Image: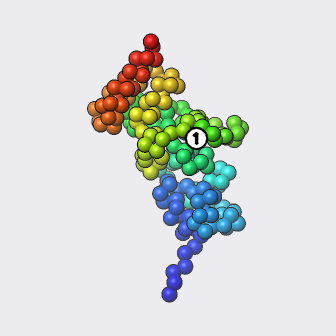
Amino acid sequence: MREVVSDLDRLREVALDQHGFVRTSQALDAEVSEASLGMLARRGRLERVARGLYRVPQVPATRFDPYMKAVLWTGFPEACLSHDSALDAWEISDINPDLVHVTVGSGRRIRRRAAPAGYAIHRQDLAPEQVTWWESIPTATPATAIAQCLETGVPTYLIRQALERAGRTGLVRAPDLERLTRLMGDRYA
């Protein structure tokens, strides 16, 4: 006998790897129709958190939810946690960002009024080796995050701290540490 899998089961399967979130496009890929998404949301089986983004309430919430929500909210496959938020995620600096920083491709456009308060959207084409996974969230590598923070004016003491901790823990290789240290020096030249 063939097992019957409900639309909610399909959505939960996707959401388990994404802190409970699922995009409409991912639901369609999982063979869940937009009509079914709407019906599940109206019945309280799904929470609509943004346009094209839902949360499956049966998946337990974590402290990382805001980061995954921000990355998925963009709707772009290359989106990743970056800048100050990535430094905070990697725990290599005492930085305390007041915004969730997300990087999308340089050719991507997001209407200003569409971006929720609390998000900083950056446009930069990152190579695949500049993005990795942290807590199942696409995130800029520590070296990339440090370089981004150098460009955006994060205070030097936080950058110096990030370089020291990243070097000590092995999160950034020695050649990258040297390059980033030179970049930090050039900042004041």
Looking at the rendering, which quadrant does residue 130 occupy? Answer: top left
Q: Quadrant of residue 74 in the image?
A: top right
Q: Where is residue 58 in the image (x, y as percent from the top left)?
A: 52, 62
Left or right relative to 180: residue 138: right
Quadrant of the image for the C terminus?
top left
Q: Name the residue under label 1.
A: 105
Question: Is residue 94 visible in this depiction of the protein?
Answer: yes
Does the rendering let one see residue 157? no
- Colour convention: rainbow
Q: Which amino acid does label 1 sit on?
A: Gly
**Vertical placement of 33 versus 138: above or below?**
below
| 92 relative position to 74: left or right | left
Residue reaching furthest to the left: 168
Q: Left or right of 105: which side holds 94? A: left
- Of residues 25 and 36, the one drawn nearer to the viewer in this rendering: 25
Horizontal and vertical percent position of residue 106: 60, 37
Going 32% across and 30% down the picture, which residue do you hit?
Answer: 175
Residue placed at 44% from the left, 34% from the top?
144
